[in-house]
Amino acid sequence: MFSYSLHSSRRSGSAGDTPPPVSDRIRFVIGVFVIISLFISVAASAQLSQRSSLIGDAGRDSLALLESSYPRVNRKFSASFPQAANVRWMRDGSDLYFSFLKEGKKSTCVFTTGGKMHYCITYLVQQDLPGPVATRLRYAYPDHSIFNVKEILFERSLVYYVVLQGKKDFVTVSVSAGEMEEVGRMGKAE
């Protein structure tokens, strides 16, 4: 069966350093945020595919509509992601959901209609991880390999959520600003 825990059983820092303790409440809030963000991005992707007639093709017409309807969002999005390709967007309530390719990688972002970005998730591969992050993961989890990588940008913070696969479990690790925290562990069925 599967088991999942938001409590960390292993913390790691650089050799000899002990990172400051992270309260259970903060760890819980981060875990809940990640889960909600993933559900929202999956829902947005599903809505984008179902409502493609509302947003048009990923071409000039769609971007022209964005520029005329939400000029602030268009400026923020264009400034934040100048190389975005295959941009698709839709409005749901007071939020705009974007799906696009960022340097060839699938990305999903959510902006308010006023132009504030809630978050952006980019799906990466192992080779896209910064060298120091990959090195710390290999050192802290030598018996695991990288299974999945997400880069999450929110409130001027950049966080990498990495799912590692071992023989008996999957481990989710959050890496940001030089800190690494195990945020979840799920056992494999035997």
Image (cartoon, rainbow, N blue to C red):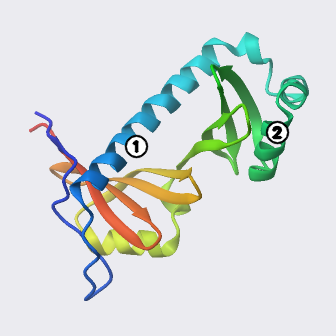
Q: Amino acid at mark 2?
A: Arg
Q: CA distance from mark 1 to mark 2?
A: 27 Å
Q: Provide residue 135's location: percent of width, then percent of height.
A: 40, 75
In the image, taking residue 96 as reference, residue 24 lies left or right, namely: left
Q: Nearer the viewer, residue 21 or 158?
A: 21
Residue drawn at (68%, 43%), measured in percent from left and top? 116
Tell me if mark 2 has few (under 14), some (14-19) or many (20+) residues whose alpha carbon lies within 10 angstroms of its own. Answer: some
Name the disc covering residue 103, or none. Answer: none
Total of numbered circles in the picture? 2
* Pointer 1 residue: 34
Examine the rendered structure and indicate whether residue 75 appears above or below residue 90.
below
Q: Nearer the viewer, residue 73 or 149?
A: 73
Examine the rendered structure and indicate whether residue 183 appears above or below residue 49.
below
* Pointer 2 residue: 72
Q: Earlier in the sequence, mark 1 or mark 2?
A: 1
Residue drawn at (41%, 63%), measured in percent from left and top? 175
Q: Provide residue 62's location: percent of width, then percent of height.
A: 84, 24
Residue 187 visible in the snapshot: no
Tell me if mark 1 has few (under 14), some (14-19) or many (20+) residues whose alpha carbon lies within 10 angstroms of its own. Answer: some
Residue drawn at (23%, 69%), measured in percent from left and top? 11
Q: Quadrant of residue 179?
A: bottom left
Q: Quadrant of residue 14?
A: bottom left
Residue placed farthest to the bottom in the image?
Answer: 16
Q: Provide residue 125's location: percent of width, then percent of height.
A: 51, 53
Q: Dividing the image into 4 quarters, which one contains the N terminus?
A: top left
